Image (cartoon, rainbow, N blue to C red):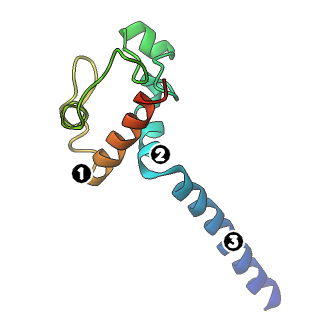
Amino acid sequence: MRRMRNGFVLIALLLLMVGARAFAEGGGEATYKSRCAMCHGVAGEADTPTAKSMHVKPLNGSTVKMSDVGLITVINNGTGKMPGYKEKLTPAQVKELVTYVDELQHKK
């Protein structure tokens, strides 16, 4: 009985640690990493092979400066070879993603 309780405690602690990491990472950053980084690069530098082959502009420089409304439109509807995510992301996720992209744009 004691082993079983200890097992449950260990599992609960592991779940808390994983949840804390996800929370610390932030919703926008997590969404960016899972949906955008493969093309736009982890830091928005468009330094991935995919970005180079598709001539993606860096998000973190002066080449891509959009208003939040413009970013929402592009994320929802896509542009060029970028697919739209209107059916895949909730409005809250899109808003968090825009906030994170804003942060990337101001890093340089």
Q: Nearer the viewer, mark 3 or mark 1?
A: 1
Question: Spatial distance from mark 2 to mark 3, Cα to Cα?
Answer: 21 Å
Q: Is residue 29 above or below residue 78?
A: below
| Image disc number at residue 30 | 2
In the current view of this chain or complex, which residue is farthest to the bottom? Answer: 1
Residue 95 coordinates in the image, percent (x, y)? 29, 47
Give how far across and how far down residue 69 sits, in percent: 18, 37
- Residue placed at 78% from the left, 92% from the top? 1
Q: Which residue is mark 3?
A: 13
Say which residue label 1 marks: 91
Judge the density around disc 3: few (<14), some (14-19), many (≥20) Cα neighbours within 10 Å: few
Q: Residues within 10 Å of mark 2 (few under 14, many from 20)?
A: some
Left or right: 12 in relation to 49: right
Work out how far the residue at label 3 is from the one at label 1, CA to CA, in angstroms.
Answer: 31 Å
Type of the residue with mark 1: Pro
Residue 66, x across and y down, in percent:
25, 27
- The residue type indicated by label 2 comes to Ala
